[in-house]
Amino acid sequence: MTAEMNPEKLMTLFEELAERLNIELVLGTGDFIGGLCTLKDQKYLVVNKKQPMDFRLRVLAKEFNLMDVSDVYLVPALREYIEETSAISSLN
């Protein structure tokens, strides 16, 4: 469990991962959940900044889990968070 990692640190790790994968992380507001999209060969991961931090982190975890990041180095706590969050989401 990633209980020792605070949400702000997880968000920073997700931001760094997006940058390494050439994905632009966009924090927006509106009536949307968020997710990955591609526009003119550029990938964007859109997150609703009006949502609580734990919700934003779950959106990011879900989207990165759908990508093949098995060959990308991830801080163990981040990889664990992505895997745990995705396992819980798949039960719903």
Image (spheres, rainbow, N blue to C red):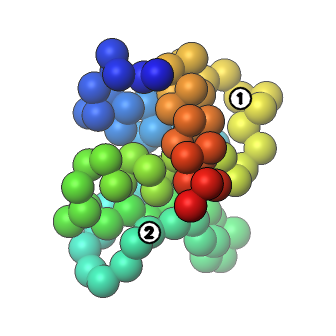
Task: Determine which quarter of the picture holds residue 25.
Answer: bottom left
Q: Position of residue 78 (x, y in %)?
A: 51, 27
Q: CA distance from mark 1 to mark 2?
A: 23 Å
Mark 2 packing: few (<14 Cα in 10 Å), some, or many (20+)?
many
From what the image shows, is residue 50 above or below residue 8? below
| Label 2: which secondary element | strand
> For this view, does 23 lie left or right of residue 25?
right
Q: Considering only order in the chain, which callout, 2 or 1, is on the residue closer to the N terminus?
A: 2
Between disc 1 and disc 2, the foreground one is 2
Residue 12's disc number? none
Q: Position of residue 79 (x, y in %)?
A: 59, 28
Provide the residue designation for mark 1: 72
Q: Residue at x 30, y 83 (%)?
A: 31
Q: Name the quarter where the C terminus is drawn.
A: bottom right
Q: Residue at x 46, y 22 (%)?
A: 1
Q: Residue at x 29, y 34 (%)?
A: 7
> For this view, does 37 lie left or right of residue 59?
right
Residue 22 in view: no
Residue nearer the viewer, 80 or 46:
80
Mark 1 packing: few (<14 Cα in 10 Å), some, or many (20+)?
few
Residue nearer the viewer, 4 or 39:
4
Q: Residue at x 77, y 32 (%)?
A: 70
From what the image shows, is residue 52 above or below residue 75? below
Give the residue type that dot 2 points to.
Gly
Q: Position of residue 20 (x, y in %)?
A: 59, 36
Give the residue type that dot 1 points to.
Val
Residue 34's disc number? 2
> For this view, does 11 lie left or right of residue 60?
left
Residue nearer the viewer, 69 or 25:
69
